[in-house]
Amino acid sequence: MNVADSEIVASILEGSGFVVTEDIDTADLILINTCSIRDNAERRVFARLKELARLKKRNAGLTIGIIGCMAERLKEQLLEAEKLVDIVVGPDAYRELPNLVSEAEGGHKAINVLLSHEETYADIAPVRLDKNGVSSFIAIMRGCNNMCAYCVVPYVRGTERSRNPDTIIKEAEEALKNGYREVTLLGQNVNSYNWNGNLSEINFPKLLERVAAIDHRLRVRFATSHPKDISDELIYTIARNENICKHIHLPAQSGSNRILELMNRRYTREWYMERIKAIKTTIPDCAISTDMIAGFCTETEDDHKESLSLMEWAGYDFAYMFKYSERPDTKAARNYKDDIAEDVKARRLTEMITLQNRLSAASKKHDIGKTFLTLIEGNSKRSKEQFCGRTSQNKVVVFPAAQAKKGDYVSVLVEKSTSATLIGKIVG
């Protein structure tokens, strides 16, 4: 979501005469796009501000701004931080940036963190900032209504609102026209997408199929699905459309029903497992990834073991795993004590990572001998003699460069693997 927001901000500012630069030393305006999901992200922002102090001393006219979720949550604190920040702008106020920059250039601190019930930036064509020119992101909705106990998103991004599907289709068509071969539809919970137009109601499966129908050369991904909302309609839609990628990110967060209830996730372990079974039955080659939290409030060793057992049962292809980080003003912060010792959280997280490394290695090993249609993203990091691409299942493949180029689809036979990468050769 932050990448998509940065591209919207770049578009708004370019319309006012700004030009994006990759040389920070020549910049007149530096904006740090922030996230408040975890404490580590916020700490990095304050560290980054200290690094920018040298630029501010060298160039008194430099304007520094904080935008995004952290801006909304810590507005006063940010304006005081190192006395460096001139602008603080929340995620629904990006249209005001040109005016706020002018205000800051006049010597005043500028701030707008008001949340909106309508803003989706649907009419703004983003400036693509990605480097590979192959994959791009399209935000289809903003905000979240789920109110998970640990999550700050509803407080810093507001309530859910879906974007007009016609503007989404237009953006995807423009991406294809400009050479992109893959789009990822983004939302805090894409399953909740719903647009009531004059003629019909469009839910997420219908939107997904409309984007896929633009052109068979355009791959379509999405993130993120909430387990309580993943429907049979969505699963069947993925199954019958070859260019909708066979990968579903389905955050479990915990394998314990007691912890899931405390988290206000609104599903049970049994419901989650039934959804995994439905996916694997209908889309046998579908990769499934997840998010897991170690050490949520009151989590016992038995709760932790249930998370490990769910991971083992699901056989996740990959996972994002984190120690619980209490976020101020959330339901968990207001009602539960963060009572799991840091060393216990760290040990439980290590156990999760160790297990997932084994599961990821097994997943990759299972692909040996199979052939996958792979989208070339460019040269591998290690050698210009090697291409790096991605399968429909979102697995990275490295293979010798041949008579092909970035943005091409090629069939790759997997010959060996590591826990993170498939290794093969172009065939056919």
Image (spheres, grey):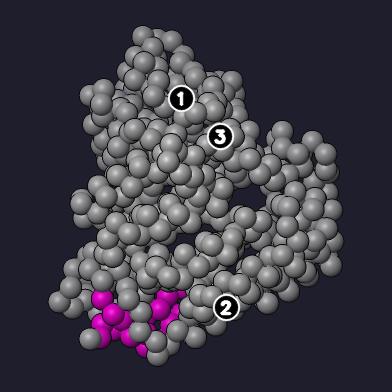
Report the residue that reaches farthest toward the bottom.
369
Q: Quadrant of residue 42?
A: top right
Separation of marks 1 and 3 at Cα, in angstroms: 11 Å
Check disc 1 and give the amino acid type. Answer: Ala
Q: Position of residue 362 (x, y in %)?
A: 55, 82
Q: Quadrant of the C terminus?
A: bottom left
Secondary element at tag 3:
helix
What residue did someone put label 2 on? 281
Secondary element at tag 2:
helix
- At 25% from the left edge and 86% from the top edge, which residue is drawn? 427
What residue did someone put label 3 on? 157
Separation of marks 2 and 1 at Cα, in angstroms: 44 Å
- 415 left or right of 155? left
Magenta range is 410-427
What residue did someone put label 1 on? 93
| Pointers 2 and 3 in contact (C-beta within 8 Å) | no
Crowding at mark 1 (Cα within 10 Å: few <14, some 14-19, many 20+)? many
Report the magenta stretch's main SS: strand
Check disc 3 and give the amino acid type. Answer: Arg
Q: Quadrant of residue 99?
A: top left
- 55 left or right of 148? left
Separation of marks 2 and 3 at Cα, in angstroms: 36 Å
Secondary element at tag 1:
loop
Depth order, front residue of 359/46 = 359
- 161 left or right of 410? right
Crowding at mark 3 (Cα within 10 Å: few <14, some 14-19, many 20+)? many
Residue 12 in view: yes
| Pointers 1 and 3 in contact (C-beta within 8 Å) | no
Depth order, front residue of 101/121 = 121
Check disc 2 and give the amino acid type. Answer: Thr
Q: Is residue 159 magenta?
A: no
- At 40% from the left edge and 65% from the top edge, which residue is drawn? 244
